[in-house]
Each structure stands twice: as structure tokens, then as C-alpha cells.
Amino acid sequence: MWSDRLMKSCSVCGNEIPAEDLVCPFCSADGENGADIPKTGAVHRIVNIERGRPLVETALKMMNLELARALADRVRVVTLIHGYGSSGKGGKIRTECRKLLDHMNREKKINQFIAGEDFRKRTGPGKSLLRRFPSLEGDCASDFSNPGVTIVVL
């Protein structure tokens, strides 16, 4: 169980990982020097663009950088963690992130994106995505109906 172990944050995706791990299990980054070393056949990556509570434009730059990195690493699906916002109405990062993703989708720079609140296991685009990439079912279990994330298909 990880809860009893000393933890560190991955320098690439920001996920908490055991301090002794040399490679992040979420994004495959090399823990020694922060270099991104993709797994062979990696399908999914988690990217946290709300970490550290950045300004909207900083979060969008980070999103663009991480999507480009994922594309170069041949990752097929990215879970963007942008948060929902403290107001309970959806935050600015979430809103602007989705506007930019919509533009990228129209420009054919990404294949698709699914808002977390619309991502369901048994219906719609979520079901279709899981049929295409069955390994995501376990990876994305916490993303189902979650308005604080957006699933991006590259």
C-alpha cells in the first residue's frame, strides 16, 4: 500500500509516486532526471494542469506542451486534470481548456475530446473510447462523470 511509503511528485505529470520508484507508473517519466521515457505501446497519460494553481494562460501553455509531448511519444489518450473550480460553477481553467480543445478539434490537431461529466462507461463517447482502448477502463475509473477532467484522444 502506497499510503505507508514516502512519496514524491513526478516532475512530468505531477502524480504522487513512491519515492523509490525510478519511473513514473502514470506517464513513464524517468524519476532520476525528469526525462520523458515513453513505455512501448503506452496508450494513456495523466496530465495535471491545475497543479500549483497556475494562471489560466500558464495552464493552457502547459496543456499545449503536454499534448505535443504525448503526441510525440505516441500516447493515444490523455486525461487532463484541470479541476472544476472552487465556485461550484466550473473554473476558468476548465472553461478555457475546453474552448482551446474545441478549436484544436475543429483544426484536426486532436481527434476528439470528452468532457469528464459526459464520460460514461456504458453509453456515448466513453463506451466507444473504452471499446477502442480496453486498457483505459482501469486507468480512467476515477474519470467517469468527473467534471474536473477532460479526456483527449490524439
Image (spheres, rainbow, N blue to C red):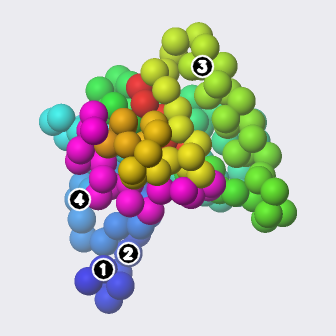
In the rendered image, which quarter contains the N terminus?
bottom left
Q: Amino acid at mark 2?
A: Met
Q: Is residue 65 left or right of residue 12?
A: right
Q: Nearer the viewer, mark 4 or mark 3?
A: 3
Q: Is residue 20 left or right of residue 63?
A: left
Circle on res. 22: 4
Viewer-nearest of discs 4 and 1: 1
Q: Is residue 138 magenta?
A: yes
Which residues fall within the magenta stretch?
131-148
Residue at position x 50%, y 47% from top? 119
- The numbered disc on residue 2 is 1
**Whole-Å distance between the Cαs marked 2 and 4?**
12 Å
Kind of residue indicated by mark 1: Trp
Return the x and y of residue 57 as percentages of the image width and height.
75, 36
Q: Name the disc covering residue 104, or none.
A: 3
Camera-near label (1 vs 3) is 3
Residue contact between numbered discs 3 and 2, judged by CB atoms under 8 Å: no
Marks 1/2: CA–CA distance: 8 Å
Element assignment for label 3? helix
Q: Earlier in the sequence, mark 1 or mark 2?
A: 1
Badge 2: residue crowd in 10 Å (few <14, some 14–19, many ≥20)? some
Task: Note whether 111 is above or below 35 in the view shown.
Answer: above
Measure the alpha-carbon separation of dots 1 and 3. Answer: 37 Å
State which quarter of the image contains the C terminus: top left
Q: Nearer the viewer, residue 120 or 60?
A: 120
